[in-house]
Image (tube, helix red, strand yellow):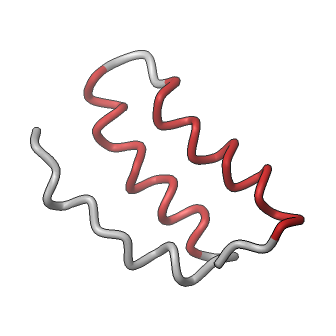
Amino acid sequence: MIDKESGEMAAGTFCTIFSQPTADLVRTQPDTVANRLGGQFPEVRPCSWTGRRT
């Protein structure tokens, strides 16, 4: 669980998925976000995006 103090930072990082300029970047950004947040929030890292459609 992400604590309340870090919630805004995590939400902002997650929102970067939807602000990518190309479809290819949108597809790769979830992995980038999971890796970035995974250092501080280990429970986020196991999120697998491999099942997504390409």
Residue 35, x across and y down, in percent:
50, 65
Residue at 46%, 24% in the rendered image:
20
Q: Quarter of the image containing the C terminus?
A: top left
Residue lying farthest bottom?
42
Q: Is residue 26 above or below residue 5?
A: above
Residue lying farthest top?
21
Is 9 left or right of 17, judged from the image as shown?
Answer: right
Residue at 81%, 63% in the rendered image:
6
Q: Is residue 29 above or below residue 46?
A: above
**How many badges with numbers are in the image?**
0
* Among the 4 quarters of the image, the one containing residue 29: top left
Residue in front for this viewpoint, 7 or 20: 7
Q: Is residue 38 above or below residue 5?
A: below
Q: Quarter of the image containing the N terminus?
A: bottom right
Is 16 left or right of 7, judged from the image as shown?
Answer: left
Residue 9, x across and y down, in percent:
77, 52
Residue 13, x across and y down, in percent:
64, 46
Residue lying farthest right?
5
* Among the 4 quarters of the image, the one containing residue 41: bottom right
Residue at 51%, 73% in the rendered image:
44
